[in-house]
Structure formats: C-alpha cells, structure tokens
Amino acid sequence: MTAPVEETASPDDDPAPADELVAPGDLEAVVPPEIIAQTLPEYVRAWVARTRSGDTGILPVIAGLILIAMIFQILNANFLNAGNLVNLLVQGSVFMLLAMAEVFVLLLGEIDLSAGFVAGVGGVIAAELLTAQHGGWPWYAACLAALVVTAAIGVFQGSLITRIGLPSFVVTLAGLLGFQGVMLLILGSGGTLPIQDDVVNNFANGNLTPTGSWAVAGAVVGVYAIATLLRDGRRRASGLVAPPRSITWLKIAAATVVAFVVTLVCNTNRGVLAPIRGIPWVVLIVLGVCTMWTLLLGRTRFGRYVYAIGGNAEAARRAGIRLARVRTACFALASLTAGIAGIVYASRLRSVSTNLDGGTLVLYAVAAAVIGGTSLFGGRGRMVHAVAGGLVVAAIDNGMSLQGFSAASKYIVTAIVLLVAVSIDALARRGNAARA
C-alpha cells in the first residue's frame, strides 16, 4: 500500500495576521476614535479619518450655523444682537422639540407626519382644561393630561404600524389629517382659545433672573462635568473603552464656554420700554428634554434596542428583541415629545388657534432632524444633533424674516438645505457600504 502523502502548508495558505486584514488608515475610518486612540493626537487623527470617510457627525451643522450667521449679519447688523439671538432660541424651541420627536421614529427608519397636529392637539387640550368652563385645572394637571393624551395617540398609531403592518407614512399621514380635524372640533367656531394661566404662558415668555441664570448655568456645567468625569473614570478603571483624559477635559471646557456665552447673551438687556434679562424658561425645557432623551437612548437597554432595530431589524429580531413593543414605544415617545412642543407653541402665542400649520411644522421638524445628522435610513442620530438642526432651521427662518423675505423664499431655501443634508447622509452611507 502506498503511504498517504502528507500535505505541507505553504506560506500562502496561512491566514493573514490581524494587522494585515485592515490597514491602519481604514481602521481609523470605521472605528470610533475613543476605541483606538490613547492620546489627543491619536484621537484627532482618527476623527479626521472618519470625517474624510463620510462620517461627518455634527460638523456640517456647526459649519452651516457659522455660514448662516455670517451671511445674515452682513445683510442685517441686528442678526447677532442679544435680543435677536434670544428670540431665535425661543422661536426655534418648537422646531427643536419636534425634531427630537422625529428622531425616535427616524432611528427605526420610519417617519411620523402627524407630529405637527399631535402637538396642536396637546396644546388645545391643555388650554381647554385651564379654562373656567372645565373647572380651571391646575397648570401641571392640565399639561400632564395633554401629554397623556398625546402619548396615547402615539401608542395607537404605533400599534397600527407594528401589529397590523401598515406603512408609517400612510398611518401618520392619516393622523395629520385626522388630528387637524380633532383640533377644529375642539376649538369650534371660535377659532382661538386664549391661555390665562401665567405659569403656562411663562414657559415660552418668562425668564430667569440674571443671578438665577448664572446659578443654573453653573449647576448645569457642574453636573455635566461630574457625570462625564465619573463615567469616563469608571470605564477606564473597568478596562472598557474611554476617550483620552484630554478629550474629557476638552468636552467639559467646551460645555463651560457654551454655557458662559449663552448666559452672557441672555443676561444682556434686550428690552425696549423695560429691561428684559435672563435665560428664557423654554431654553431649560429644551435642555431638560434633550438630556432626558439622550440618557434614555444612550444609557439604557431600550436605547440599545432602538439603534439595533434601526441598524438591522432582522438581526435584532433574531437576537430576541421584541420589535413591535420597542417600535410602538418609540411612536409613543415621539407623540409625547410632540405634545411638549405643542404646549410650548401655545405658550409662546399665549393661545391656540385653528391657524396652527401642523403640516409645515412637521416638515421643518424632519428637516431639522436630518440636517442635524439623523439618518432617514435608520440606525444613526442623536438628540443633541436634532437640537442643533432645529437651531439651523430657526436661524434660516429668523434671518430671512429680518430681511423681509416672503414665505415662498423661506420654503425654497429650507428645501435646498434639506436636500444638501440628505445628500451628505446618502454619500456617507455609500462610503460605508463601499468600505464594508
């Protein structure tokens, strides 16, 4: 018998070493900087590589805000004065809140076209319950009831989408029409319902005192600094991924500078007949909602499930995630946030009327979320980016209003900005797919 021939492995048959499978430049382009960076220069180099690969993050929003500020300041010297900047924050608060509402559904690759009129329903219910005709509910009870109703609307729409399988576009488009009719039924022939409660009116029209503004700004920065240092320190001690210490301190320094500038601008006298100073209450409302939802999406199991479903729903299902429950919860949270926006909108006008244009509001909200970096295809987006996108939309609207531009011009410019943002998103996805 012939002895079996023993095969000898050639060098070409050996698996390539791990460091040869992915080039260092490619690794920096696909891996978050904090994973591979140990020092500040390494972090910057990895961040630049990811930016060049198409993952631009919030960079286009910052660049857009700077460009918008420069253009409108050249056209009108009043754009960057304290009064207009604070007014811009107040005007943009509704866009920011509705953009955060859209983030919940956009992360799933869905959309909610009803958010504008769901916000209107929330504002109408709160205003109705505050009237003497309904017993003059306390402001907190009226607002809570309005938010419960809007959350229930989200559960209803989400159940139709997840349990029956109806497209979110169709369900929420029906909601856009239906809840506009609900608003008209509640308001009746009167058309306008004033809000008499001072607390609710102060949501968007009231201000902290200058001293209170500095105290709140210091407290916010202090809490952020402590939380950031403890989180990163705990991760380093456990051997988990954490950014370099220099990056941690740079984040704290950036937050301190932003808080200082915002407080300084808000504490500048912007009154005409009487002095007006202090941070508007609505800024704290937006900050509180953004912080709450950021923690929910970034620090909880529910948030990880949302991103997993948006990234690959089938893989998430195979991993044991209950898709229907999580998706329904996202629609409920979106409607709840829209209810907050509706109350703020009613507060700013001190009334609710049938003139509320929920269709335009929701389109601006989607534009703000996408401009901020939330992907229309699901799986990518952050609440703070939605806030930044809302600020861009508000700045465009405010700047063109100062110039006396028509509504048609505002729509056209906002549409162009939205197309640019979506193009950036599509190009980034194409680059990621090519690297994969």
Image (cartoon, rainbow, N blue to C red):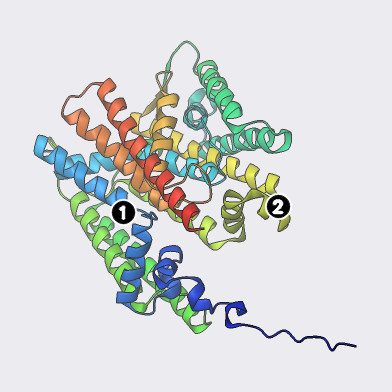
Look at the picture and state if 32 lies above or below 97: below
**Alpha-carbon distance for marks 1 and 2?**
33 Å
For mark 1, what is the residue?
Answer: 59
Which residue is disc 2 drawn over? 317
Residue 251, x across and y down, in percent? 32, 67
**Residue occupying image coordinates x 35% and y 72%:** 43
Q: Residue at x 45, y 33 (%)?
A: 342
Q: Is residue 50 visible in this depiction of the protein?
A: yes
Would residue 295 be found to the left or right of residue 223 on screen? Answer: right
Q: Could you tell which of marks 1 and 2 lies nearer the N-terminus?
A: 1
Residue in the foreground of this view, choosing between 29 and 271: 29
Image location of residue 411, percent across then percent down: 31, 26
In the image, 360 versus 339, the foreground residue is 360
Q: Amino acid at mark 2?
A: Arg
Q: What residue appears at the point 62 percent right and 82 percent down from the top-left corner?
A: 10
Task: Classify 370 as above or below 379.
Answer: above
| Label number found at residue 341 | none
Toward the viewer: 177 or 223? Answer: 177
Give the quadrant of residue 371: top left
> What is the three-letter code of the residue carrying label 1?
Leu
Q: Secondary structure at mark 2?
A: helix
Name the outermost residue toward the top. Answer: 189
Front position in the image: 368 or 276: 368
